[in-house]
Image: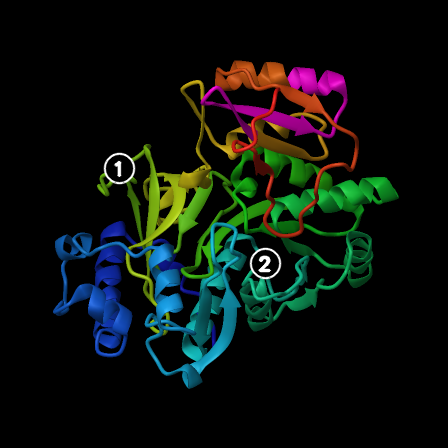
Amino acid sequence: MTIVHRTDLETARPEETRERQLERFNLLLAEILPRNRFYAAKFGSLTPPLDWIEFAALPFTTKAELVKDQLAAGPLGTIATYPRERYLTYHQTSGTTGRPLMVLDTRETWDWWIECWQYIYRAANVTEHDRLFMAFSFGPFIGFWAAHTAGLQLGAMGIPGGGLDSKARLRMIANSEATVLLSTPTYAMRLAEVARQEGIALSTLGVHTTIHAGEAGASIPQVRDRIQRAWGAKCFDHSGATEVGAYGYTCDAQTGLHIIESEFIAEVLDPKSGQAVPEGSVGELVLTNLGRAGWPVIRYRTGDLVRAGGHTCVCGRTFQMLPGGLIGRADDLMVVRGINIYPSSIEAIVRNFEVDEFRIVRMRRQEMEELLVEVEATNDVADALADAFSAQLAVRIPTRSVAPNSLPRFELKAQRVVDRRGNPESL
């Protein structure tokens, strides 16, 4: 497949983009409805073309539906548009929020993934002259599989870092003279921690760009700044999901995520009412992929909370913005004495301090939720953090110093929230 860098799509008038999206959506419907049993049953006698009012009336799709469908009609379920023989790649969701979901792509839809990744690389100023180090184990979770293939398509060297520990990866980054690091934001900080212990100055290795996915952290200014200081490189965020595709990226301005509106329809909706929220308000991100006929998701509730943005950016792109990137997941919300708190809010404060790793423990005391934050730091830092939580979150959160290297480290998605509400403890 030849990649065509359609920069005109990123700078088109929003009205033109909307018109193109609706045209693509109706072409998608015409392709899948005669073949896709899941949506044929879901939409009944629906006949394209649809207008935007009819689109907004379509029922949502959820991960729970897709998992149930695969359990009932395994192994593929009825969401697969084509016979199994037509599919080329196999992936599973990470399973962090329930049973893993199998997701397959045809050659055409895998090429579509690669095209989406070209937007990400272009925004991060990655070219065919770069050498891309994938700090990832390359299992069934899609992770950076698409990034690796897209890098090769771009003409850049792909360096797989699977099967290595952190020390070996650092040596490989140095020996291969890698210029771009791809990892979760947590793992980029973990590599920085190991480099410090080994006396390695990351800024001398030649990595000029880091691209992160799998977690919301790279759009948190404090996390981004920490990664940039450690690596001496510019940090870019990317958002995607196995069941949806690679749908978002940050540009040089680093003010939030651009949705790839040439390939996705994005809605930011009130999770309860299902109605669009006004610009500047927080809602759930709902996505429709337009180039994945073999495994389509229509009005898919991602569970991710974002802030609805406009279509202007200093970079000149007119794709819809999500200021601040992914805020958190709807099911991550913690309510402490009437205050809504997301893990990302706690991490944003923690990263202002000299803390190698931290953990949030959820507990219950007399029917009230309480939090405890454990940090690998000195007692003085823990006390200062507790004061910062009180000042910035308007709620007291006890903070406890723990021994160095006593908390888990993560290569993929970090799991820093431990739920002990079913086993009450004294703080």
The magenta span reads: 362-385
Q: Three-letter amino acid code at disc 2?
A: Val
Above or below, 97 against 399 in this view is below
| Furthest residue toward right | 199
Which residue is disc 2 drawn over? 126
Image mark for residue 277: 1
Above or below, 210 against 221 in this view is below
The residue that appears at 54% across and 51% down in the rendered structure is 214
Where is residue 258? Give x, y as percent. 42, 48
Q: Give the structural element (helix, strand or loop) at label 1.
A: loop
Label 2, residues with CA under 10 Å away: few <14, some 14-19, many ≥20: many
Above or below, 152 against 298 in this view is below
Observer able to see residue 262: no
Above or below, 338 against 301 in this view is above
Question: Between disc 2 and disc 1, whose residue precedes?
Answer: 2
Which quadrant of the figure has residue 148?
bottom right
